[in-house]
Amino acid sequence: MTDHFEPLIIGFTCNWCSYRAADMAGTGRVKYPPNIRLVRLMCSGRLDPTFVLKALSSGADGALITGCHPGECHYIEQNYKALRRVHLLKRILKPLGIDPQRVKLVWASAAEGVYLAKEITNFVEEIRALGPLNWPVHTHVSKVKPRQLAEVPR
Amino acid sequence: MTDKPKFAMYWAASCGGCEIAVLNIHEKILDVDKNFDVVFWPVAMDAKYKDVEKMQDGEILLTLFNGSIRNQENEHIAKMLRQKSKLLVAFGSCANEGCIPGLANFYTKKQIFDTVYSTPTTDNPEGTRPQFNFEVPEGKLSIPVFNPVLRPLDSVVDVDYHISGCPPESHQIAAVIDVVISVLEGKAELPPKGTHLGVGASTVCDECKRKRNVKQIKYFTRVQEMKEIDPELCLLEQGLICNGPATASGCGALCPAAGAICAGCYGAAPGVLDFGARMVSSLASVVDEKDPRKIDIVMDDIADPAGSFYRFALAGSLLQTGPASWTDN
């Protein structure tokens, strides 16, 4: 382990709330650590757990998923879907040797820039305490590709 | 020696079911014999590694390689057969995504050895473990080194084609053999390299004949805990963890038709990068709860989520292995 560890976190944000909250934090000059890299999704329900696994297997130390508060989803109830996915995803991370705390779900509305900045700061510190994930970035990951098909007469 | 094209089949870390599936193509096996000279097939005939070593590069036309890469011997033969074969086919789930042997990737090498050599029923009072190199008065003995991480074939060598399944369905093997024979006769062209032969363009659910409704799952269960299984209704809707939504079609949904869950042996459906993640995604989508505590209660019903979702695909998944050490690989 290096003396100075700067966590690398991938943040998956919802276009309608938390991405705007992060934007608001920016315009409001609210500071949060630069360890997080935000990816904008149209909804937290768009989050395919594959994204998180790919981030973790490609060098990220943690993943933060943010969405609209329960009951406030732009697409009615897709944030509940994200909630359930995160719950189940954490259960498959543990047997694979990844602390489930490396994946976190936070609700933040478009008005909660300060709150989101605080949550990001907390999460960075939590990951810092957990230490680097150091998942071996193996040539294997680059070889995992969707299948190519050819119809064989049956 | 004849001038027929040469055929080889090899098993690495596997159970031998793939070989049986090949023999299960019935009289089509005579076409294999008519069109090919079988040069190397440890299960069916006597041949030595040395015979293969002596061959020219690319001398074997078609090699069906089943089994995953568990130890250095598997790795050595995989590399050798790659060199000697024009077409190397990753045959069956083990060679493609690790299959059942790949579940060992949840554990370290030490845990695996402890499980194998120190079970309550194992008579091993001194706790002996295999020694990969051992000196005896007559000289040095060695056995193939056990790799800490089990890998699918395409992590080790370049693979031309993939045939899925545990084991692949015999009619598909027959179809593939037909294609290769018609290529030999100049009647057809080979599909593009890297193609998965025999799998369909959709999921097992698409082929499944069971009745499907809008899924609203309140609990999960296991087949041994059920009084009876509805013969018509989707198994997932009955609370069974069926891997159909993530699995490639091609098998004809045989297991669900017989009342058993789809275990996922045909591997990831087209467009699916990580089998387990797709299962997380689809199962979580259909659970009908919104309260975090109630969600946890439903999820608690799943006895072994990682093992169930990655039953066949762990070694070929994005994370590939659990806490196993990577140092030797």
Image: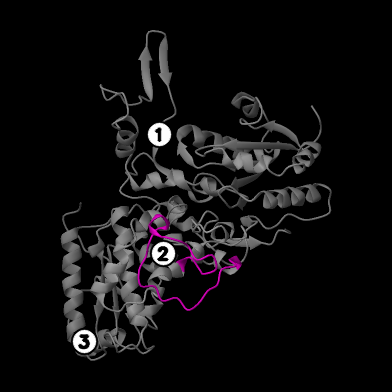
Q: Residue furthest top?
A: B137
Residue type marked 2: Ala
Instruction: Specify start and end residues of the magenta stretch as a single range.
Output: B207-236
Question: Along the polypeptide, which appears first: circle 1 or circle 2?
Answer: 1
As rendered, which of B115 and B176 lies closer to the eye? Answer: B115
Mark 1, other Cα within 10 Å: few <14 / some 14–19 / many ≥20: some
As rendered, which of B18 and A96 lies closer to the eye? Answer: B18
Return the mark for residue B73: none
Q: Choose mark 1 or mark 2, whichever is in front.
A: 2
> Residue A3: in sight, yes or no?
yes
Question: Badge 3 sits on which subunit?
Answer: A
Magenta span dominant secondary structure: loop
Residue B276 pos. (x, y %): 42, 60
Above or below B237: residue B148:
above
Q: Which residue is mark 2?
A: B277
Q: Choose mark 2 or mark 3, whichever is in front.
A: 2
Residue type marked 3: Gly
Return the mark for residue B146: 1
Return the mark for residue A113: 3
Residue B184 pos. (x, y %): 80, 47
